[in-house]
Amino acid sequence: MKKILTAITLFCSMAYGQSGEPYQIYTKEGKKVSYEKMVKSLSKSDVVLFGEFHNNSLGHWLQLQVTQSLGAKKELVLGAEMFEADNQEGLTSYVRGEINEEQFGKDVRLWNNYKTDYRPLVEYAKSNKLDFIATNVPRRYASLLFKKGTAALDTLSIEEKAWIAPLPFPYDGNLPGYKNMMAMFEDHNDENLPKAQAIKDATMGYFINKQFKAGKLFLHFNGSYHSNNFEGIVWYLNQYNSSLKVSTITMVESADVANFENDNLGLANFIIVIDANILKSF
């Protein structure tokens, strides 16, 4: 596993700055921008949402590079969709060195690609004594909402509700992202599907705001669809704390990273176009 990560790192390090780069960064207006300028801009934010493709190995490499670069400029708090709120105790115990990695794997529900894609971020937090926040709603509660509607969440215990955005959570079914979900899945003629997505966005936004510390930068990792077009988590952060300065990164794949497609305009503050042939982690 270490050999694979080392090979990816060496490849990306050599490719950056050469012609035929494996990725190119653009602003939301479609203008090319350097990595250094992107980091400088992001460092002025309160919250940065790094939208990813879960299986893109270069994207995960870039997440670690951005984390290290921002960490050199500002004290960080890290957080991620990949950890559910009821696993916070285990995650905190590990990054504080109170339990070993074997116990960590027993105490926390880790994604199948944790070791290749997210472990470097957790280890960075551990090495630098940073807080790492489990922001996502426990999957079983999003599933409950999907199957039985929002009223089903009212039946949860006080302890269980502590792992979810406060109820009733705000929801705008007219947001394009949620409307598109309804259009894509015509079999679902009610709003339980987009609301199941929204409870994830709401919970992530809620815990990011709750754990935000003035003077620090909260760097959060999530699927790109949770923050693209400044919707999803961004919308909820604005509901919970409109004073936060939020910046977003997203990634898209293309056969020609030097060609910015108009469909990607406005997706995020910074859009990383990655070669479509890049290695996938799964």
Image (cartoon, rainbow, N blue to C red):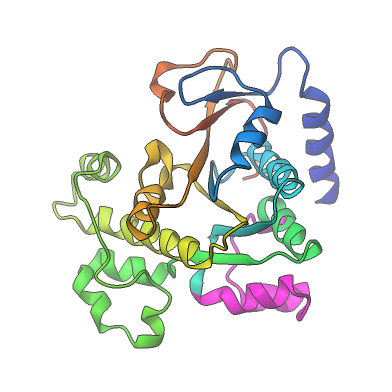
Is residue 76 toward the left or the right of residue 182 in the image?
A: right
Assign the magenta stretch its main secondary structure: helix
Is residue 159 toward the left or the right of residue 91 in the image?
A: left
Residue 40 % position (x, y): 66, 35
Residue 201 % position (x, y): 38, 56
Residue 51 % position (x, y): 52, 43
Q: Is residue 99 magenta?
A: yes
Q: Quadrant of the C terminus?
A: top right
Please name the residue shown 56% across and 23% down the image: 26
- The residue range painted magenta reads 86-115
Relative depth, front residue between 204 and 110: 204
Please name the residue shown 76% across and 60% down the image: 123
Please name the residue shown 71% across and 46% down the image: 64
Q: Is residue 249 above or below residue 150?
A: above
Relative depth, front residue between 140 and 209: 209
In which quarter of the view is residue 237 placed? bottom left
In which quarter of the view is residue 168 placed? bottom left
Q: Is residue 256 magenta?
A: no
Relative depth, front residue between 281 and 251: 251
Q: How many callouts does the rendering have?
A: 0
Q: Is residue 186 above or below residue 17?
A: below
Residue reaching furthest left? 189
In which quarter of the view is residue 158 placed? bottom left
Relative depth, front residue between 243 and 269: 243
Residue 61 % position (x, y): 71, 41
